[in-house]
Amino acid sequence: MPHIERLPVAVALSPDIEYRPGRVRPHRARVRWVDPHTGRRRSLSRSHRTEEEARKWIERLGAAALRGIDPAASNPTLATYGEANMGLALRGLEPKTTDPYLAGWRLRVVPSLGHLCLPMVTNGAVDRSVYGWIADGCSRSTVKNSLAVLVRVMEQARRDGLIQANPAQVRGWQREYARAEDELDDPRSLALPDWRALTTLAEALVARSHGEFPGWGEVVIFAACTAARIGEVSGVRVRDIDPERWIWTVRRQTTPSPGGLVDKRTKGKVARRVPLIEEVRPLVARRLLAAGSDPDARLFTGPRGGRIATAVLRDATHWDEVVTSLGWEHLRRHDLRHTGLTWMADAGVPLHVLRKIAGHGSLATTQRYLHPDLRSITEAGRSLSAHLSPPVGPAQPPGATRRML
């Protein structure tokens, strides 16, 4: 089936209805039009039981033609419509995003809903499908990608006038995952406990790498101290560092693409500033010195000068084996960012400042990184006790305050 964007808009149809007695469906409706690309005359016909049905069918085709939709597909199934219009529905997205979207479409959306005609894809049908994916053990990101591609396809169908509202914009499904996360015994388990743990991890990763490349440990320490993604650490250039005020301006990240690793803008599409704490400044100073005077030189590279990605760091350092041996088998590379944000929150960095450092679009996202430690909880209890305790000093007789007033 041709893609919708390649079809002519407002093609003129020539309709007619022929009555053929003696048949179960005696009323044959037919529409004809001239393809403006080839000049050929095309037609489509269908038999109906009554003349009224035939006229309604012609009206639907006429409305579809006015919107530039192939008259042969005026009432397609979700799978058929999605295949014909996927390029338009996913326009503007990068391959890194479209790949998981297309996988979600192929493996979950089409098996669950693909056989339904577009008007039959209701909120209820989408709800049941989404919760079915959750029951099957799909991760949050898998469900999110599958639902996202469905939303885009149905939004294109709404724009084409085939449906009145987008039924895929469902809410509440992420609460299922939130409940599971709330049941964790230690919500701080996604963050390293302290500086000693971070340096121990960095040293262990260097020891397992080929040639014991020290750069891997520096990448890990820098990522945790700046609450940055590994791709952002890979993307930092000399000119991004202000060694006088010790500020890093995060402008880009390195991410995988079908053609290999590429540099692009940050996840939020907006540059942000991150403080470089005293513990990481000697490391940065050494890197700046080694990079020389080239402002576009990368601060962090692999052993052969190549760009770094989270998978590269994992494979080069035997990450999974190292963290398991240290008792942190849950730890992912992204949890270095979680560690930095958690430490900053524990240090008392205000939430609105923490949001700017993290580059989050909303405070709700930043709040997910805030897990008060036992010391903070104990101090909160002491503060409340001090607030409730009577003032120290000689007791005043009853009614003294009234007499003073």
Image (cartoon, grey):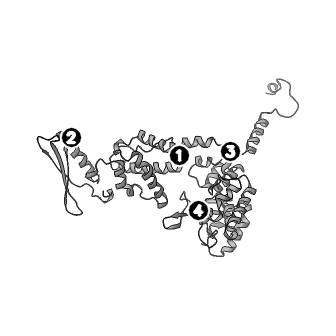
| In the rendered image, the vertical position of residue 369 relative to residue 395, given as above or below | below
**Mark-to-mark CA distance, 1 and 4:** 24 Å
The residue at which mark 1 appears reads as: 137
Depth check: 152 or 48 in front? Answer: 48
Residue at x 63% of width, y 40% of height: 183
Cα distance in 3D space between marks 4 and 3: 27 Å
Identify the residue under disc 3: 186
Q: Amino acid at mark 1?
A: Gly
State which tag comes first along the sequence, 2 or 3: 2
- Per the image, the residue denoted by label 4 is 311
Label whose residue precedes the other's in the sequence (1 or 4): 1
**Is residue 331 something that shows in the picture?**
yes
Q: CA distance from mark 2 to mark 4?
A: 59 Å
Task: Quadrant for the N terminus, please.
Answer: bottom left
Residue 333: image x %, image y %?
63, 57
Residue 72 lies left or right of residue 402; in this view the side is left
- From the viewer's perspective, is the residue at label 1 or at label 4 nearer? 1
What's the amino acid at mark 2?
Glu
- The structure residue drawn at horizontal position 77% and vertical position 33%, both measured from the top left corner, is 388
Front-most of residues 24 and 178: 24
Disc 3 secondary structure class: loop
Residue shown at the point (35%, 45%) measured from the top left = 118
Residue 53, disc: 2
In the displayed structure image, the side of residue 261 where residue 328 appears, left or right: right
Earlier in the chain: of badge 1 and badge 3, it is 1
Q: Are marks 2 and 3 in contact (CB under 8 Å)?
A: no
Farthest residue in the bottom direction?
Answer: 293
Disc assigned to residue 38: none
Q: CA distance from mark 1 to mark 2?
A: 45 Å
Compare marks 2 and 4 and give the one earlier in the sequence. 2
Mark 3 surroundings within 10 Å by alpha-carbon count, few (fewer than 14), some (14 through 19), many (20 or more): few
